Image (spheres, grey):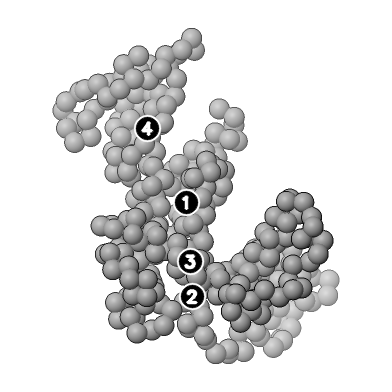
């Protein structure tokens, strides 16, 4: 069945834009992709006909979405905005300095005019950061180090599944140390019942959002005063924080690229929930809205089964 839709840029003209399959049960559903602007305009036009008498009049049958390429490109723009600074050329280990080392002058234009070049540099930069983190975590002095006792004998002679499980566990240890920072997990600990966030007054057992919330509760409700962790001032290692932040965001983008490559939709939409926060925080409000809208629809469909 040929479908009609208003042209986004010329709303006074009605045109044919393609075909939507018609089966015994009526019109079928097809996905229509593009960039965020195309998706948003098309969806708004569809909503404008929501009071139609029939499915055809309501322009049903098409589900609009922005393609993953555009979403990942926006994340790369956020990566560029946060970490690319021309004044950091002399600072060893920064993104700009690494670009100079790799002689990737084209990537300095950013993911807008040089998407492929910047994506390749981001991959190399994130890989280098992970290798540096792994070397520090496992006490290696050089990338060529090969301690004889590093890989257990039972793993060397084990099945491919056992070797893969061991490797994944070691990689997870590095991620837990350098990406999943403990202070970022306080809220999660409260939700899972971690005893560190439970009121320390005997018999209370109240779950608190974080350590500061627990201190306030103990002081107001129980007049219990303890040494606050917030009073302990630790010297900030800004270079380390910068590299860990770059490693974490690089992992998110690489994970999305791999999910697209593998066709892993479930993993991809878990990552979109992280991307939504990044879009909102760094001024990509339209992508944040569309991501929220898409994930909400997916949740409703999977919950209701319709």
Q: CA distance from mark 3 to mark 1?
A: 13 Å
Question: If you read the primary sequence from the N terminus, does the residue marked by circle 4 or circle 2 appear first?
Answer: 4
Judge whether 160 appears above or below 189 on screen. Answer: above
Judge whether 148 appears above or below 165 on screen. Answer: below
Question: If you read the primary sequence from the N terminus, does the residue marked by circle 2 or circle 1 appear first?
Answer: 2
Q: Residue at x 64, y 76 (%)?
A: 145
Question: If you read the primary sequence from the N terminus, does the residue marked by circle 3 or circle 2 appear first?
Answer: 3
Q: CA distance from mark 4 to mark 2?
A: 39 Å
Judge whether 117 appears above or below 224 on screen. Answer: above
Residue picked out by circle 1: 257
Residue picked out by circle 3: 126
Residue picked out by circle 2: 243
Q: Residue at x 45, y 68 (%)?
A: 125
Residue 175 in view here: yes
Q: Position of residue 36 (x, y in %)?
A: 33, 45
**Between tags 3 and 2, which lies in front?**
3
Residue picked out by circle 4: 32
Question: If you read the primary sequence from the N terminus, does the residue marked by circle 4 or circle 3 appear first?
Answer: 4
Residue 51 in view here: no
Crowdedness near tag 2: few (<14), some (14–19) or many (≥20) residues, C-alpha within 10 Å: many
The numbered dot on residue 177 is: none
Question: Left of 186 or right of it: where is 54?
Answer: left
Does dot 1 land on a helix, a strand or a loop? helix
Question: Left of 168 or right of it: where is 273?
Answer: left
């Amino acid at each position: 069945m040929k479908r009609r839709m208003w042209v986004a840029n010329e709303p006074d003209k009605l045109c044919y834009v393609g075909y939507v399959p018609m089966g015994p049960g009526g019109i079928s559903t097809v996905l229509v992709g593009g960039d965020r602007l195309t998706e948003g305009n098309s969806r708004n036009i569809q909503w404008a006909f929501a009071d139609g008498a029939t499915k055809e009049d309501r322009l049903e049958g098409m589900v609009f979405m922005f393609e993953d390429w555009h979403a990942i490109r926006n994340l790369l723009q956020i990566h560029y905005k946060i970490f690319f600074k021309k004044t950091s050329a002399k600072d060893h280990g920064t993104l700009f300095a690494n670009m100079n080392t790799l002689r990737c002058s084209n990537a300095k234009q950013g993911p807008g005019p040089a998407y492929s070049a910047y994506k390749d540099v981001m991959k190399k930069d994130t890989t280098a950061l992970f290798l540096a983190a792994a070397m520090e975590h496992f006490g290696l002095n050089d990338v060529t180090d090969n301690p004889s006792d590093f890989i257990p004998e039972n793993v060397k002679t084990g099945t491919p599944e056992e070797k893969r499980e061991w490797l994944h566990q070691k990689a997870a240890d590095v991620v837990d140390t350098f990406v999943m920072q403990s202070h970022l997990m306080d809220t999660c600990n409260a939700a899972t019942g971690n005893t560190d966030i439970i009121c320390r007054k005997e018999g209370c057992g109240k779950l608190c959002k974080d350590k500061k919330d627990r201190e306030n509760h103990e002081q107001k409700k129980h007049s219990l005063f303890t040494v606050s962790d917030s009073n302990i001032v630790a010297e900030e290692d800004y270079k380390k924080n910068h590299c860990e932040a770059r490693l974490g965001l690089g992992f998110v983008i690489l994970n999305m690229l791999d999910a697209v490559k593998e066709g892993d939709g479930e993993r991809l939409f878990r990552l979109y929930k992280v991307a939504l926060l990044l879009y909102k925080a760094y001024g990509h409000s339209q992508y944040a809205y569309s991501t929220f809208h898409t994930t909400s629809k997916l949740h409703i469909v999977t919950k209701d089964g319709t």
